[in-house]
Image (tube, rainbow, N blue to C red):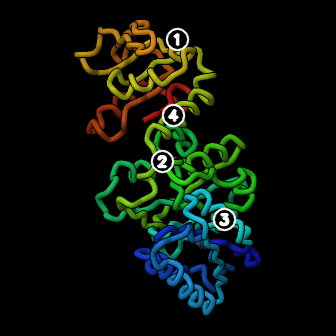
């Protein structure tokens, strides 16, 4: 039974959103939750320089005709970034639940109702995502397949694997308590993975992750996405540091699976302590097996200790796996299965 006394706030940060506003809001009006649940729209216009403010005024009237309150805030003194915009939109909201929506994406008709129903089944410390489809359809195929097919256990186990959370930010639905406990999003003008920082802190505080296994969002790919303003090295360093803190600090030794570029980059990013814990690289490439890797130190102008490169069948777990999935026609995945290891205990996925 729906708890109609719950208010759901749809949180939308917008910067120069004119090309997307009509499509976004028309699909919010198609939600099956309208007339069943109490909704409000909470928008932060991050000092847009296009006609976003005028468009928002028109949609305010439209939503209020449907008895859906439409709250707006505009940053007048310059663009403050996505994290700040989300925080400001939440600050003007009153909902018991928060449904995050990017203006360039589209929520499908059952999104709010399905995620709300799932929220009532979970604890108030849970971020709930959903499956999604990409537009254009052929964009980020591997990433989309990975995110949509993670098992419930992998939602928590593969949190070191990607550029972002295991449930993507545009699909988040959560109790207001989640936001308040984390303390909001990290704020900077550009180049910050504010969703990943929030997600990691949520996990550190004992937060849960769940996903509605239905496609409830169209996730738009275009070159003006905020994602492309985020520095790759920043994300890499966050991932490495978290893996060291959460996993490697508990392992007395480990093997790096992949003696190629990605594995070596990972090794060189580790602390001296964790480099010493690295007993070997493992691979299937016969041109690498039997050789040794000795990284060159630019500061000391000398090579570091030699590390053996061995066949994966001769390697001793636990493994940090720096192999990307779905790139070897299933060969890597098949090799991993033959070892009959337990994810999270015998290995952790990094790439």
Cα distance in 3D space between marks 3 and 4: 28 Å
Q: Position of residue 210 (x, y in %)?
A: 59, 53
- Mark 1 touches mark 2? (CB < 8 Å): no
| Position of the C terminus by quadrant | top left
Q: Position of residue 37 (x, y in %)?
A: 67, 79
Please tell me how crowded label 4 is: few (under 14), some (14-19), or many (20+) other residues with Cα within 10 Å. Answer: some
The CA distance from mark 2 to mark 4 is: 24 Å
In this picture, residue 96 sits left or right of residue 214: right
Write down the quadrant of residue 79 in the picture. bottom right
Residue matched to label 2:
150
Dot 3 falls on a residue whose secondary structure is helix
Q: Residue at x 66, y 49 (%)?
A: 208
Lower position in the chain sequence, tag 2 or tag 4 = 2
Label 2 vs 3, first from the N-terminus = 3
Q: Between residues 262 and 119, which one lies in front from this camera angle?
A: 262
Mark 3–mark 1 CB contact (< 8 Å): no
Q: Is residue 295 visible?
A: yes
- Label 1 and label 2: CA atoms lie apart by 32 Å
The residue wearing badge 4 is 237
Q: Residue at x 51, y 34 (%)?
A: 237
- Give the foreground label among 2 and 4: 4
According to the image, label 3 marks what residue? 88
In the rendered image, which residue does mark 1 sit on?
276
Could you say which quadrant of the image residue 44 lies in?
bottom right
């Amino acid at each position: 039974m729906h708890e109609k006394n719950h208010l759901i706030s749809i949180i939308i940060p917008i910067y120069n959103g004119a090309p997307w506003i009509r499509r976004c809001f028309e699909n919010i009006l198609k939600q099956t939750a309208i007339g069943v649940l109490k909704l409000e729209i909470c928008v932060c216009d991050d000092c847009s320089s296009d006609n976003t403010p005028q468009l928002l005024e028109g949609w305010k009237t439209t939503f209020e005709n449907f008895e859906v309150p439409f709250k707006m805030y505009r940053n007048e003194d310059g663009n403050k970034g996505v994290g700040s915009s989300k925080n400001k939109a939440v600050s003007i909201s009153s909902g018991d639940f928060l449904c995050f929506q990017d203006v360039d994406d589209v929520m499908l008709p059952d999104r709010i109702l399905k995620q709300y129903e799932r929220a009532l089944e979970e604890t108030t410390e849970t971020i709930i995502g959903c499956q999604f489809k990409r537009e254009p359809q052929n964009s980020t195929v591997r990433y989309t397949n990975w995110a949509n097919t993670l098992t419930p256990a992998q939602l928590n186990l593969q949190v070191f694997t990607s550029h972002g959370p295991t449930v993507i930010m545009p699909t988040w639905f959560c109790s207001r308590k989640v936001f308040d406990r984390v303390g909001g999003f990290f704020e900077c003008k550009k180049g910050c993975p504010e969703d990943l920082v929030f997600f990691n802190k949520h996990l550190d505080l004992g937060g849960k992750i769940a996903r509605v296994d239905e496609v409830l969002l169209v996730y738009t790919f275009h070159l003006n996405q905020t994602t492309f303003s985020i520095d790759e090295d920043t994300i890499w360093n966050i991932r490495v540091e978290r893996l060291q803190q959460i996993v490697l600090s508990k392992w007395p030794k480990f093997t790096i699976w992949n003696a190629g570029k990605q594995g070596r980059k990972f090794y060189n990013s580790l602390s001296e302590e964790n480099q010493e814990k690295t007993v070997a690289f493992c691979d299937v490439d016969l041109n690498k097996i039997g050789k040794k890797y000795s990284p060159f130190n630019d500061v000391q102008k000398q090579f570091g200790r030699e590390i053996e490169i061995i066949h994966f069948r001769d390697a001793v777990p636990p493994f940090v796996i720096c192999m990307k999935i779905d790139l070897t026609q299933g060969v890597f995945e098949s090799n991993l299965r033959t070892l009959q290891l337990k994810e999270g205990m015998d290995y952790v996925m990094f790439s």
